[in-house]
Image (cartoon, grey):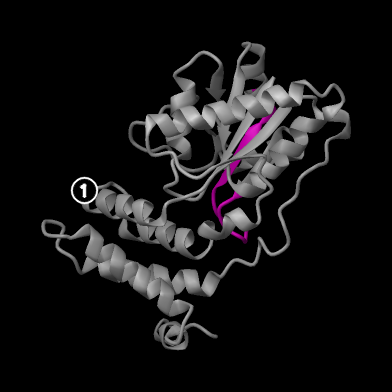
Amino acid sequence: MRFLILVAPSGAGKTYFSNYLNVGDQYKEVVSTTTREMRAGEVSGVDYHFISKSEFKKKIEANQFLEFINTKADAQGDYYGTSIAAVEAVFNAGQSIVHVVEPVGAINLYNHALELGWMPAILFINVNIDLALERFVDRYFSKSSASAEEYADRIAQLLLWESDWINYIPYTVYSDKSETEEDLKKMEVKADAYFESYRKIADRRINAVKLSLKKGFFDKPVDKIHALKQFIIEEFESIDANSFKTKEIVKSIKAKREALSGNEKEKILLAYGLDM
């Protein structure tokens, strides 16, 4: 069975592509498991399998996850994971899988899929930074239910870490955009071509090399992300939602991002009580 793993920075369109594939009969998204609280409009078993942290930890101990992460480095955040049962439910229904995960989870899923005899592929979708930023700004000021802090965190992570993922993730299929239906069709064709070539090599699974994230991936610039996040929160909260100008806000955020890498870096870090 095909196991298409989608990885991309925020705003690149991975969910857009996943939804596109889910419309057809071939692919189905795996329902992940999480410990976070259910949001308005969400349905357990459809959006996520919602369970408690104690239940999640028991499943970890019982090796019931192919991959899992915690949203905080100290493991005090929420857990997200892909269970073996959820994957097998899709395969048992005769469908292939498309699944959106973070980079570490993607590598773990790929390697586990090899061990279990499935056909895995990691499709990396690169991001158009300007377009992604404009979308985030528009969504926030269009009365989104998410807070300024949540949006600021996503933007800061995108600009200072996620946009560099392409240098560290050993993807097997690549796309540089997913903005139109034509882009989506091209990505589907690329994935199909990869899987077809995979099938033609009888011993591919046996001889396949496991993947790993390239050295340097975990060197996350935490201090810079925090500084940029604080700036964005202040920027958002100082702007009237009825008269915001998307491109001006994007320009301001990008300028601050550049400043963190240039001569103003020390001044910005010190302004937020951070060490160099």
Magenta run includes residue 55:
no
Q: Quadrant of residue 237?
A: bottom left
Seen from the viewer's position, the closer of residues 276 and 14 is 14
- Point out residue 72 in the picture as x, y percentages from the top left corner: 57, 57
- Point out residue 210 in the picture as x, y percentages from the top left corner: 80, 42
Q: Is residue 47 visible?
A: no
**In the image, is residue 194 above or below residue 123?**
above
Q: What residue type is labelled 1?
A: Ser
Q: Residue furthest left?
A: 242
Q: Residue at x 63, y 34 (%)?
A: 82
**In the image, is residue 202 above or below residue 105?**
above
Q: Quadrant of residue 195?
A: top right
Seen from the viewer's position, the closer of residues 172 and 44 is 172
Magenta run includes residue 74:
yes
Magenta region: 70-85
Q: Quadrant of residue 62?
A: top right
- Point out residue 12 in the picture as x, y percentages from the top left corner: 45, 46
